[in-house]
Image: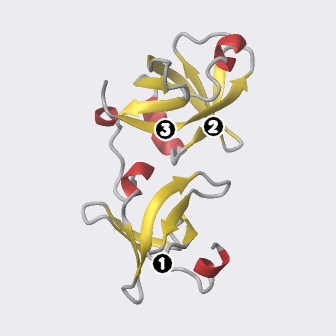
Amino acid sequence: MPELVVLGRITRAQGLRGEVRVLPYGVAPEVSAKLVGKSVFLRSSKVSEPVQQTTLEHERWHKGTWIVELCGCSTREGAESLVGCELCLAEDNRPPLDRDEYYPDQLIGSFVVDLRTGENLGEVTAVQPGAAADLLEVRRSNGGWFLIPLVRQMVKEVDLSSRIVRVDLPEGLMEINR
């Protein structure tokens, strides 16, 4: 089994022809379009169930929702049976991204550094999907945590090779997110 990267979680069936709604984990429309025709994997939350391989046949976005059509799933009942599964991609099958684009799992374990002071603010422990933007969950060295919207106004630089995320945060952001 190849190393899998989670793209999102199937939340419900869409329509009558087997499409599913996916809560994306950092997948943006410009990235999701590159996944059409690629092999994907469905991983159930039940450990005893085997991982299923299929093909992403078609995808689209509607009002911020990622809607996916998978090979072999052509009925609403089939789509409903997939609810709760993680939609995954083999690590080595990721489409290349443009400069300044990255996959959420590449950020986990990176240190967040204040651009102005050079202070280490903490470590990225997760990337949470958000309504307007994904959120970096940062664990502070003192045990607290805070969230940073993954937007250019705050996240100024991501250095994947050094595992450093440089940020310029508005005053008070770290305090309101505790």
Cβ–Cβ below 8 Å for labels 1 and 2?
A: no
Which residue shows up at 51% across the image and 14% down it? Answer: 71
SS under mark 2:
strand
Chain-order first, disc 3 or disc 2: 3
Q: Earlier in the sequence, mark 1 or mark 2?
A: 2
In terms of secondary structure, where does tag 3 sit?
strand
Q: Which residue is tagged 1?
A: 142
Q: Quadrant of residue 96?
A: top left
Q: Which mark is residue 125?
A: none
Report the residue that reaches farthest toward the bottom. 117
Quarter that holds the C terminus: bottom right
**77 or 109, which lies in front?**
109
Q: Can you tell which mark lies on residue 7? A: 3
Q: Is residue 87 above or below residue 152?
A: above
> Distance from label 3 to label 1 (Cα)?
31 Å
Horizontal relation, residue 88 to residue 10: left or right? left
Q: Position of residue 173 (x, y in %)?
A: 61, 79
Q: Is residue 123 visible?
A: yes
Q: Would residue 75 be found to the left or right of residue 100 on screen?
A: right
Q: Amino acid at mark 2?
A: Trp
Give the residue at x 48% y 74%: 140
